[in-house]
Amino acid sequence: MLPLSPSPQLAPVPDALDRSHILALLRLGDFSQDSFLATDSAGIVIYLNRSAGRLFGYRNGSALHLDVGVLLPEIRRVNERLGSLGARNSVLWRGYGLDHQRGALALVGAATHIPSPTGDSYLYVMRERRPVAVDRGRQAELASLVYRNTSEGMLVLDPKGFILDVNPAFVKLRGRDAGEVVGRHVRCLNSPCHDRDFYRAVWRTVMATSSWQGEHWGQHANGELYPEWLSINTSFAEDGQVYRRVMIFSNIAEIKQAEAIIWKQANFDRLTDLPNRQMFHDRLEQSIRKSQRSGERTGLLFLDLDRFKEINDTMGHAMGDELLKEAARRLSGCVRQSDTVARLGGDEFTILLNDIGDPRDVERLARSVLRQLAEPFRLGVETVFISTSIGITFYPDDATDAETLLNNADQAMYAAKAEGRNRSCYFTASMQEQAQTRMRLVNDLHLALDRQQFALDYQPIVDLSTGRIAKVETLLRWHHPILGRVPPSEFVPLAEETGIIRTIGDWVFCEATRQVAHWRSQFAQDIQISVNISPAQLRHEGLDHGFWRSHLDTLGLSPEHVIVEITEGLLIDSDDNHIQKQLALFHEAGIQVALDDFGTGYSSLSYLRKFDIDFLKIDQSFVSNLDTSNPDLALCEAIILLAHKLGLQVVAEGIETQEQHRLLRAAGCDYGQGYLFAHPLSADDFAALLVGDPALIPTP
């Protein structure tokens, strides 16, 4: 703070200025870059700081006691504005001053009225507005060039809202000549799409903030409506009053169209034009909220087309797409306009039903859907037939949130498939219990390998000509600490779905080959180990063949001592040649391949010609009732003859009687496997079997 001793620029203290005003002025400081000037109520200069002295050309206090009009000719008009403001006592102002050496000064600043019981005073804070060195003519020329040639429509209003001018782009945009609008109030451009309240709100914002911008519906002279982006800005005069308002119009129809396309692509399925998964979830959430308010039920149907993959694979994806589009059309024709049919992906569809009054309506809809999709589909020159499996669930009966509701419908759909397909199934609490049991089993499955809960059993494969053990099949077992032995039919599909099967499969291979290497060393017996391969192990990234070969080298085991078993179902999914390449890698490494359960699936001779296969395994369903009067014997003989003609060897599964053994041996079958020879055994029990008589079944 400056000392309170008299300043060389401070006049003798008049009666009209008390000590508090003196303190306020002194605190402003003589060293501020802003210019400070104070007068008494009569307009006599009583204070100015050094910056003000330099600004006006008066040094060492020589301006004190002068009439302020000598320095600021228009300041009395500013004082009048201060006097008319009532409670307010300060204003911003623009004006000019006089430098008695240079002439006029352009100034900008603030003025403050300081009322006092002993006499009012005025304080002015200002800076010089230094002119920018520009070519005014050139600037005006450029502004006119932009105004006349921009693609955005522009019009200029006076302070009262009357149109003064429009540019050519506005004429083109609105289809109105300048003569039609110039001189008229801007209200003549109001759109029928907006009411008075809208425009009142717009102009209230302009009056308060000097600008507004937002979306607006413009109208062409021919009556056509289009979306536009409207901006309104205000230009002020030197005295701070409104001088002009400028309105800018931009046609955003193409932008809105592009946004609509993007929105549709994000929310609708491109193939069927139905709502996609994202849109379906949004509508499901909305339907649940509506049901919460109204108390009505919401129904959800989850559909999966039966046999679609078979048609897609055999007839091609183009025909599959046509089938999906026709299925979508038929589904849409079954529902009300207020309902939603969506495609979640692949051959999965959902139907969302709002405001269900009678649950029997849902049953009638399900029957209608089943009938419609059972009708023949004409695909090009082909006619195909499909069916569908439907899961049905309700809100709030079965769930209180969207995710659980969808899961329930999915579980019910799988139950419909399990019951034979081409039917509908309602969600029940027992399905939820099964799903929870399944989830717990999956969690335990993730830990089973680390906790050493897996074990291998071994079942001998016998050379039917000698009765001796030639090979051994490895069978995976899971000993759960609570559930006991879990059947492979329960846990292997879970391991395949979750991807754990690859890690488990590598463990099975390592453990089985380690065991057979030990037996070969211990008993000096030439024996092959057969390992089952899950289709999931060969899909996608496939097996790590390098790791398998390295492991065999470490054990000193030749690849010829290993057989991998695959199922026919794996070959059905081989149209991308990925599976074929995987099997070729086995063949190149010297590992033999056996085709398991031959004859039970979509058996095709093309598989035997296309893939590198060494053994066919006749399924036990052909062996279990084998006798001389059963047609299965002819089938077995045909398979054996076919395999031998193709250079393949045959293993018969499920041999339990001497008669089955005799008939298969007489038919030329190479190997046999079944309870007649031995049940699956632990490693120790199998070793004991090897120690005994090698001929399990004496040859006749």
Image (cartoon, rainbow, N blue to C red):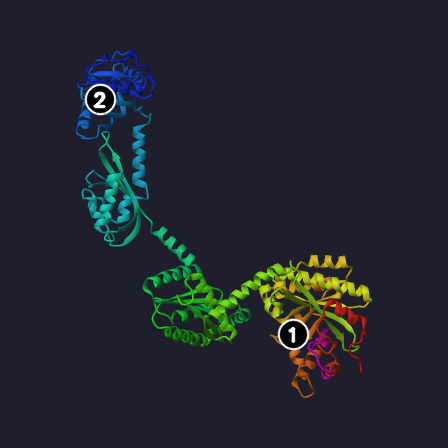
Tell me the quarter of the picture where residue 681 sits: bottom right
Residue 268 visible here:
no
Helix, strand or loop status at disc 1 = strand
| Percent of width and height locating residue 214 | 30, 46
Residue placed furthest toward the bottom = 629
| Percent of width and height locating residue 341 | 40, 66
The mark that comes first in sequence, 2 or 1, is 2
Can you say which quadrant of the picture contains the C terminus? bottom right
Q: Which mark is residue 122?
A: 2
Q: Nearer the viewer, residue 403 or 167?
A: 403
Q: Which mark is residue 597?
A: 1
Helix, strand or loop status at disc 2 = strand
Q: Nearer the viewer, mark 2 or mark 1?
A: 2
Compared across the picture, whether 476 is left or right of 153 comes to right
Would you call the spot at circle 2 few (<14 residues within 10 Å), some (14-19), or many (20 or more)? many
Judge whether 278 appears above or below 242 on screen. below
Compared across the picture, whether 515 is left or right of 132 comes to right
Compared across the picture, whether 42 is left or right of 648 comes to left
Q: In 3D space, how far apart are the residues under numbered discs 2 and 1 (Cα atoms)?
A: 107 Å
* Range covered by the magenta-colored residues: 642-660
Can you say which quadrant of the picture contains the N terminus? top left
Residue placed furthest toward the front = 482
Amino acid residing under circle 2 = Tyr
Would you call the spot at circle 1 few (<14 residues within 10 Å), some (14-19), or many (20 or more)? many
Tell me the quarter of the picture where residue 690 sits: bottom right
| Percent of width and height locating residue 282 | 40, 59
Q: Nearer the viewer, residue 228 or 410?
A: 410
